[in-house]
Amino acid sequence: MDVTRLHRVLRIITLLQTGRPFNADQLAAECQVSRRTVYRDLATIEKAGIPFFYHADDGGYRIHANGLLPAINLTLDEALALVLLAGELGKTGRLPLFQPARDAAAKIESSLPVGLRSVLAGLIQRMAVRPGPVARHNALQEPYRLMQRAILRQEAVDASYISFHDAGKIRLRIEPYWLMFNERAWYVIGYSSKHREVRTFKLGRFKDLKLTGTHFKMPKDLTIEKHLGNAWRMMRGEKSYDVRLKFSPLISPNVAEVNWHKTQRISWDDDGHVYFTATVDGLDEIVWWVLGYGPEVEVLEPPELRRRLAPLAQRMLTLYKKA
């Protein structure tokens, strides 16, 4: 598109945003072009996804009132946070299925005043966001969008699912309540007809997804916070445990500076040990976190967690003794 046409298309968009109806003759007069050229420009605007419509009563075109967001005045800190997060996390592989965030970041940046844009560009080049490793998400765009539609419409979904717990592929109908990205991957939380309870499913293990046309109602007052309770991450166990850990001085500073869990409490002794306490629902997830610190942490409570760690540590010892 040449510069002259670009200016003309932007001029038409500006006119249609005023809320006053403009017909083809009026737009042609405003832009000093033919009606035929106006129709070509309107077709370009339509292809760009800008929602204008023709109002038969007054014989003019308008852009839908909710079609474009109003301009927002951003401070440097606000613009920097949005552009940095949206741009970095939207890069391929950073936060799966969030590539559109890069387009949003570009739009925000282009709408800023020239002076602010220049300062922002200099800062962006010297800042970075690096999330941890994420799961492969090839070919997940359509399942992601289908689940979004199902959640919005409150419509049940039929699917096959690769279940490690059930040792193979299963068929189920799920009423999806939430999509949640947790650490490495996207998950769907919803009611499973097969299991007759609310379960968490990894989005990437769904196959043959199909909207059923059957609608559901979410339980009243159910929130994702209530569902997860005090789970260490996202798999809530049936029993609650008061966990107390003692970390060595070597890693205590690193442990103390992180908010690992919403119930955690930290205390120090005179020798530099950190005592970490938290109330968690279930031990299946926290056991692997504790194991990752090896000999630098000791479980003081509960006894059930000590008993679960002991055979795992013994298996590791046996494995490395072979070498």
Image (cartoon, grey):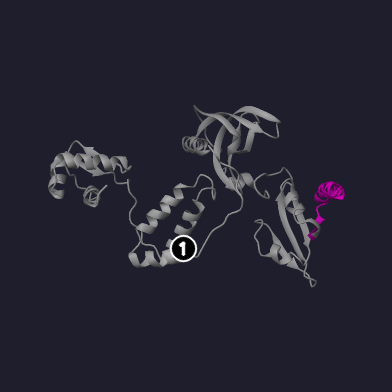
Q: Which span is picked out in magenta?
A: 296-323
Q: Is residue 210 magenta?
A: no
Q: Work out which residue is located at the far front of the displayed protein and give it.
A: 323
The x and y percentages for residue 264 are 69, 59
Q: Is residue 307 magenta?
A: yes
- 192 to 128, vertically: above or below: above
Query: On the picture, is 68 further left or further right than 228?
Result: left
The reply to whether residue 223 is in sight is no
The image quarter in which residue 193 lies: top right
- 150 to 75, vertically: above or below: above
Residue holding disc 1 = 124
Near mark 1 (Cα within 10 A), the count class, few <14, some 14-19 or many ≥20, is: some
Please, what is the three-letter code of the amino acid marked with disc 1? Ile
The x and y percentages for residue 49 are 33, 42
Which residue corresponds to the image point at 78% horizontal and 64% vertical from the top-left?
248
Magenta span dominant secondary structure: helix
The reply to whether residue 73 is in sight is yes
The x and y percentages for residue 275 are 76, 63
